[in-house]
Image (cartoon, grey):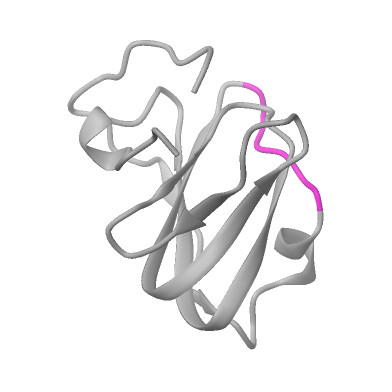
Amino acid sequence: MTDRAQPIDDASPYRSSPVFDETDLPAALRREHRTKPGVWGVVRAMEGSLDLHFADGTPTRLVTPDRPGIILPDQPHWVVPGDRMRMRVDFYTCPPPMSLNGDESS
C-alpha cells in the first residue's frame, strides 16, 4: 500500500466496533464510506471471510481470520460479507503495528 506512515509498535485501537455477522452487518458498512482523517481502520474477520473494496483503485482484499484488511485515513471503502462470517473494525489514531497488517502484497 502507498502513503503508509511508520507504524508505532505499541499502538492500541482507541475504539472497536461491535462484532457483526452476515445478518446484522449495518447497511452503512455495505456502502461506500470513509474513516475520519487521521484514523486508520483494521477490518478483522473472526470467522469466515469478507471482501474489502476500495473506491480509490486499491485492489479488493479478501479478509480472513489470519489476514486483516487495512484502511487508510479518509480512504473510501465498503465491505461485502461472505455467506457466514463474523467481523469487527478496530480504529487507530496512528498506523497500526505491522504485525496486524498480514500479507499486504495482494
Q: Position of residue 21 (x, y in %)?
A: 53, 81
Viewer can see residue 2 = yes
Judging depth in this view, the residue of 92 and 33 nearest the camera is 33
Image quarter in which the C terminus is found:
top left
Q: Quadrant of residue 28?
A: bottom right
Q: Is residue 61 magenta?
A: no
Q: What stretch of residues is rendered in magenta?
A: 32-37
- Number of numbered discs on residues: 0
The answer to whether 24 is drawn above or below residue 36 in the figure is below
Judging depth in this view, the residue of 1 and 36 nearest the camera is 1
Name, please, the residue furthest toward the front: 106
Q: Position of residue 89 (x, y in %)?
A: 48, 55
The answer to whether 66 is drawn above or below residue 69 in the figure is below
50 lies left or right of 105: right
The answer to whether 72 is drawn above or below residue 63 in the figure is above
Picture residue at 60% right of the left edge, 26% below the top: 73
Q: Is residue 34 magenta?
A: yes
Picture residue at 30% right of the left edge, 42% below the top: 102
Picture residue at 77% right of the left edge, 38% below the top: 55
Q: Quadrant of residue 57?
A: top right
Judging depth in this view, the residue of 67 and 33 nearest the camera is 67
Q: Position of residue 22 (x, y in %)?
A: 60, 82
Viewer can see residue 19 = no
Q: Main secondary structure of the magenta part?
A: loop
35 lies left or right of 99: right
Picture residue at 36% right of the left edge, 41% below the top: 13
Judging depth in this view, the residue of 97 and 52 nearest the camera is 52
